[in-house]
Amino acid sequence: MPQVKLIATDLDGTLLDSTGRIPERNLRALREAMARGVAATICTGRMLRSARQFAEQIGINIPLVCYNGAMLAQPDGHPAWSLTLDMGLAKELLAMCLERRVHVQSYVGDDLYVRDADAAVFRDYVKYFGVSGSVVGDDIFNPPASPTKLLAMAETEEGAIALEGDLKERFGDAIYVTRSLGTFVEMLNPEVNKANALRRLADDLGVAMNDVMAIGDGENDIEMIKSAGVGVAMENGADKIKSVADCIAPTNDENGVAWAIERYALDVGP
């Protein structure tokens, strides 16, 4: 078994429980690993503004992987590196969402833009993620700069799967498309995924990917789970991610992250 020198954990459905909080056992395990010299970071589809609160709670002092790997940023909020969508392509994607009547959000830098603040899915988003956005009406279809990410929100998981398939068929390798939280369809630069950003961070820290433990639950975690020396999928995770993981941890409501850290980084338990 590799010696774990860097822990990378997803947030939603992984480190966070169903209430959106870090359970005390998960928090304690991360802090203990860091006290022993193991680096730790967050790898999330969330925007930096939304992820920082958890990094501060944990005490992380290395860059965070945000926007599914489109941005590496310091915990103090300063982006260190990012990749954006081609502007022309972004406008095509936004137009497709308009045509499909799918709610879409545009992220430029670390700013969030929406067409209509009264959309039910956006109100739910604000309530869950604790961030607000700028309401720009139809100007959302003409971004002020190349977006870091576009996020389409389908009404059902089946609708999200269908939209994901249509995007891949129409745009192919010109974009990276992935799903998160069931009904979220995320569109990014084709070179983006969590594994690529995590590999860049590990290189900067002088850590081999074989000494990285990555923990996640969603399809947007597949690449980093496969690339890590220890790839951990949550029991509540998607079947696709479980099929590529080295081991399955208990659910996010059963301290699955702590379970993995205790066994593979702290040498506690069987």
Image (spheres, grey):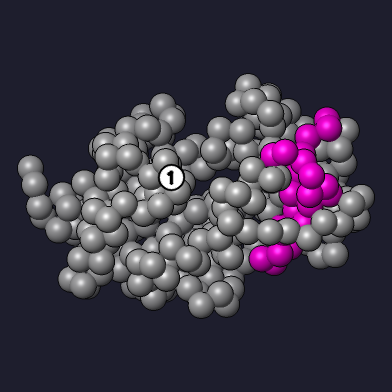
Q: Is residue 120 left or right of residue 41?
A: right
Q: Quadrant of the C terminus?
A: top left
Residue 227 visible to an observer of this rendering: no
- Give above or below for 61 relative to 66: below
Q: Position of residue 208 (x, y in %)?
A: 31, 63
User: Which residue extends farthest right?
Assistant: 138
SS for dot 1: loop
In terms of depth relative to the viewer, which is nearer, 200 or 33? 33
Where on the picture, by quarter, is residue 241?
top left
Residue 253 lies in the magenta-colored region: no
User: Which residue extends farthest top?
Assistant: 158
Find the magenta span and give its range: 100-121
- Give above or below for 232 relative to 4: above
Q: Residues within 10 Å of mark 1 (few under 14, many from 20)?
A: few
**What residue sits right under mark 1 in the picture?**
19
Q: Which amino acid lies under the numbered mark 1 shown in the image of this protein? A: Thr
Q: Position of residue 66 (x, y in %)?
A: 54, 59
